[in-house]
Image (spheres, helix red, strand yellow):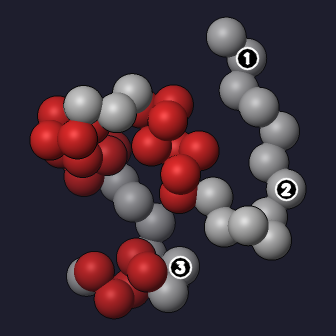
Amino acid sequence: MISKIRHNTLPIGATLLLRMHEVSEFSIRELRELMVRPDEVVEPLAA
């Protein structure tokens, strides 16, 4: 599972995202920003 997420073949689901948030104390928004690959262009989420 970790390998598939790292190679971008498996998206990170809501359950895993929430667990990462609980453990790391990063906000969901910060985690999503960190998950973007450098070559991807992403529009910011509306606040």
Helix, strand or loop at label 3? It is loop
Task: Name the foreground residue: 6 vs 9.
Answer: 6
> What residue do we see at 28% from left, 80% from top?
2
Which quadrant: the N terminus?
bottom left
Percent coordinates x, y for residue 36 in the rendering: 63, 58
Helix, strand or loop at label 2? It is loop
Please give the residue where the numbered disc 2 appears in the rendered image.
41
- The type of residue carrying mark 2 is Val
Task: Name the foreground residue: 37 vs 5.
Answer: 37
Task: Name the foreground residue: 4 vs 36.
Answer: 36
Rendering quarter of residue 5? bottom left
Q: CA distance from mark 2 to mark 3?
A: 15 Å
Helix, strand or loop at label 1? It is loop
- The type of residue carrying mark 1 is Ala
Rendering quarter of residue 39? bottom right
Q: Is residue 18 visible?
A: no
In the picture, the disc for residue 8 is 3
Counting every numbered tag in the picture gives 3
Say above or below: 20 vs 2: above
> What residue do we see at 66% from left, 67% from top?
37
Please give the residue where the numbered disc 1 appears in the rendered image.
46
